Amino acid sequence: MRFPKVSPKKCFFLVLCFAVLVLLVFNLRELNSKSTHPIYNRDEYQVEYNNHVKDDASRTTEMLGRLDLSDRDGDQPNDQIQPDDPSLHGMNGISYSERPWYFSNGVRYPKPVRRNRKTNKRIARLLPSETARSDRITNQLMFVPPNYEAIKRKGKLKTILLYNGLGPWNVKAGREVFYNAKCPVSTCSITSAREKAITADLILYKDHYIPPAVPRSAHQIYMMYFLECPYHTQHVKFPDVFNWTATYRKDSDVVAPYEKWEYFDPRIRQVEQDRNYALNKTRKVAWFVSNCGARNGRLQYAHELQKHIQVDIYGACGTYKCSRTTADKCFEILDRDYKFYLAFENSNCKDYITEKFFVNALNRNILPIVMGARPEDYEASSPQKSYIHVDEFASPKELAEYLHILDRNEELYNSYFKWKGTGEFINTYFWCRLCAMLHDEASFQKPKWYDDINDWWRGPGVCTNGSWRNYRARKDAISEE
């Protein structure tokens, strides 16, 4: 059998056409992949898209007990965080339309979470046992159960019983809080009627535990919410009671921080600023404080720092006065005259970072010096290079020497403000997340228990009266013996 003859020219032409076709297909695929943002433009938000990020909406009544704007230990009253509204918004890689719903102007809502084809488990990391690298807040905000459409059709609501009453939470009974927040998962209802303790899906206690007078139902969740640090909260004497916790700590089941910083685009954490934050500032360090007996020695540290640099202490613990009735004017003084602010907490406890840092300092054009939580806690919760931790220095004198360097070097000082405009403090929508978690099948299949919630909340290593630097030095010395 004879095969038809094919000329070399025709072969070359066919090969060339095939090569061009392959190249065209490759380029089209490459172009399509580049047009899709690798972080936000996907359905699986729940797969902890910002795990590699070390973790200005207004404070709302939803912030669970932080409704009294006066500081719990007598410091100056806090303001509400207002958005910077920088011109960079919408120009730093993430447009408004791509931002998740919990951002200011964010419109992107989650879809029902997918399941793993092999294990049939939901692809989402919502519980502390599923990841130790983040607070999981954004994962919970973007969680919708796989069968949520069927849940809505059935019309059955999850009931949340606030056992201490509605007052401490400043919410109304019913579904209003879920509707007003436009929660992605809203099929929940709030009640304070204790007679519903036997049927409620979740019984939530704030700061104090009172055993119900009725037997506990199977698959019922008991949850403890603590606002303050362990030094100022109840010792719970009942073991094996609580399944979930809600506190500022990152290893809580539903984390309720004082504020939550989130980048618009995790790849962009520093941008050049168009202003000089040191301009016309003639004074060095300021501090607003009225509680002079904090157990972490913050006042003694400030007095030692005063020996080496100017520290103006306003309030009952110092010689400078600024009335609480004119709090806005007091904080205007910070922006205008001072370069540094002491954002010192009243206790040194794990993850304990309050409005002293987030509102009184980061909301201003001043560089905060922090004391309270561990250095790694501030690193995970703050904008990149936005503060100075006292434990970075061996002594107040060494800290003062560095502050003098910053005072003389405006470029170095301004480098601490390059985070501005890269993100915002988001509303963490506690009730939305709690409702979503109550619809998570995995949370109920094998419910967790705190054998001793006191051991978890106030056990060894949670708080220290001295610095974390000294605590670790003592711990290392003991381990070497």
Image: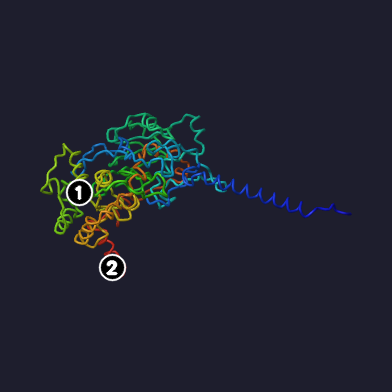
Q: Which mark is residue 281?
A: 1
Q: Which mark is residue 440?
A: none
Identify the mark nearer the N-term, 2 or 1: 1
Residue 254 appears in the rendering: yes
Count of marks, rendered view: 2
Q: Choose top left, top right, bottom left or bottom right for residue 480.
A: bottom left
Query: Where is residue 459 shown, x and y percent of the image?
Result: 30, 54
- Residue type at mark 1 is Lys
The residue lying toward the viewer, choosing from 13 and 431, is 13
Does the CB distance between marks 2 and 1 fall below 8 Å? no
| Residue 128 in the figure: left or right of residue 294 | right
Which residue shows up at 50% across the image and 43% down it?
42
Task: Provide the secondary structure element on which disc 2 rests.
Answer: helix
Quarter that holds the C terminus: bottom left
Quarter that holds the N terminus: bottom right
Which residue shows up at 43% across the image and 48% down it?
50
Q: Which mark is residue 477?
A: 2
Query: Where is residue 19 shown, x and y percent of the image?
Result: 67, 51
Calculate the distance from the C-alpha at mark 2 to the C-alpha at mark 1: 44 Å
- Residue type at mark 2 is Ala
The residue lying toward the viewer, choosing from 151 and 112, is 112
Task: Provide the secondary structure element on which disc 1 rests.
Answer: loop
